[in-house]
Image: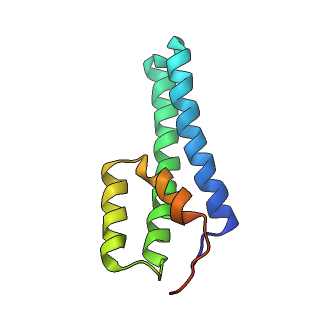
Amino acid sequence: MPMTTFEKIYSLFSIFFVLGLAAALALNPELRQLKPMLILASTGFFINIGYMFVVLRNIMCKSNFRQKDKFFWIALILIIWPASIIYLILYGFQKNITS
């Protein structure tokens, strides 16, 4: 089952949120205080739980992936988060073609 439009938009939103949060923390030292950091980190945490659900579900629903490929991508994404961006570019935003 290919990603729906909502899932694609949500994935892009969560990636841009993380990049924006990193840039904001790097450029605004006042955000590094406990209270704003706690709010931003909690928001990012919940956004990324949804993001990981969308990406991992997409991997498991790919019918043209071998089981070994699915486990490779899942392990890689769980160990190295930016690998999910590479996965989305290569496979996630494309239609599910059965071979």
- Residue 84 percent coordinates (x, y): 45, 54
Q: Quadrant of the N terminus?
A: bottom right
Q: Position of residue 11 (x, y in %)?
A: 58, 54
Q: In the rendered view, would you say 97 is above or below 59?
A: below
Above or below, 94 relative to 40: below
The front one of 25 and 85 is 85
- Image coords of residue 48 (percent x, y): 48, 49
User: At 48% from the left edge and 77% from the top edge, which residue is drawn?
Assistant: 62
Q: Residue at x 31, y 65 (%)?
A: 72
In this rendered view, identify the residue nearer to me: 74 or 50. Answer: 74
Taking the spot 40% from the left edge, 47% from the top edge, the residue there is 81
Asked which quadrant contains residue 59, the reply is: bottom left
Nearer the observer, 69 or 46: 69
Q: Which quadrant of the view contains residue 68?
A: bottom left
Colour option used? rainbow
Q: Position of residue 91 (x, y in %)?
A: 52, 65
